[in-house]
Image (cartoon, rainbow, N blue to C red):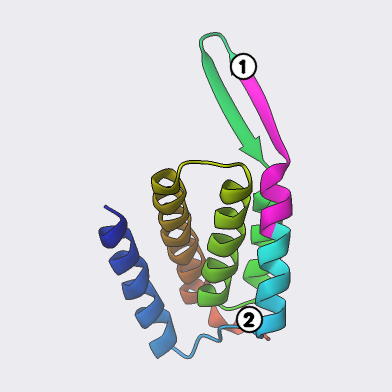
């Protein structure tokens, strides 16, 4: 499953790179990775009867990152930040791998869709 997710994300990365999408400066990517890591630690748990929902504030970082980085930079910074956050919580390695790959794929698809909708908004 991880392989399928990474191949899918790679396909989107190839698609947006052929349209001239920037990646972003390495320092900016590292800064957003740190922000994703910090904000993913700030979670709010909501209880709805027998169901529990956890919401984090990483969407705030995602919105700023989409306007500051290219799609590949958004996916890299988000996956690194998410992975580091899960490792520091001592999650099992397989769970960290799967969740990080899933998050990378989701961010790649979302940022690619945003980029392909109007590349003119990315004035990096």
Residue picked out by circle 1:
47
Q: Residue at x 47, y 49 (%)?
A: 96
Residue at figure coordinates x 55%, y 55% from the top left: 83
Whether residue 78 is visible to the viewer of this picture, yes or no, is yes
Image location (x, y in percent) of residue 34: 71, 63
| Quadrant (top left, top right, bottom left, bottom right) of the C terminus | bottom right
Q: Secondary structure at mark 1?
A: strand
- Tell me residue 2's x, y (percent): 31, 56
The numbered mark, 1 or 2, whose residue comes first in the sequence reads: 1
**100 in relation to 27, above or below:** above
SS at badge 2: loop
Which is closer to the viewer, label 1 or label 2?
A: 1
Which is more toward the observer, 63 or 8?
8
**Left or right: 41, with 103 as reference point:** right
Magenta extent: 36-47
Q: Is residue 70 above or below residue 66?
A: below
Seen in the picture, residue 92 relative to 29 is either above or below; the reply is above
* Horizontal relation, residue 34 to residue 113: left or right: right
In the picture, measured across the screen, residue 109 lies left or right of residue 59, that is left
Q: Is residue 18 magenta?
A: no
Neighbourhood count class around disc 2 (C-alpha, 10 Å): few under 14, some 14–19, many 20 upward? some
Q: Residue at 73%, 71% (x, y): give it.
A: 31
Query: Residue 19 appears at what percent x and percent y?
Result: 43, 88
Q: Position of residue 106 (x, y in %)?
A: 45, 57
- Quarter occupied by residue 55: top right
- Mark 1–mark 2 distance (CA, rounded to whole Å): 39 Å
Question: What is the number of the mark on residue 122?
Answer: 2
- Answer yes or no: is residue 68 visible: no
Are discs 1 and 2 less than 8 Å apart at CB?
A: no
Residue sticking out furthest to the top: 49
């Amino acid at each position: 499953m991880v392989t399928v997710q990474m191949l899918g994300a790679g396909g989107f990365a190839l698609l947006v790179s052929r349209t001239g999408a920037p990646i972003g400066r390495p320092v900016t990517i590292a800064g957003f990775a740190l922000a994703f890591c910090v904000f993913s630690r700030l979670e709010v748990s909501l209880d709805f009867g027998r169901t529990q929902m956890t919401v984090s504030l990483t969407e705030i970082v995602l919105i700023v990152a989409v306007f500051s980085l290219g799609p590949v930079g958004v996916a890299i910074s988000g996956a690194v930040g998410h992975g580091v956050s899960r490792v520091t919580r001592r999650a099992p390695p397989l769970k960290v791998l799967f969740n990080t790959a899933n998050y990378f794929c989701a961010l790649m698809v979302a940022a690619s869709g945003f980029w392909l909708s109007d590349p003119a908004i990315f004035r990096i």
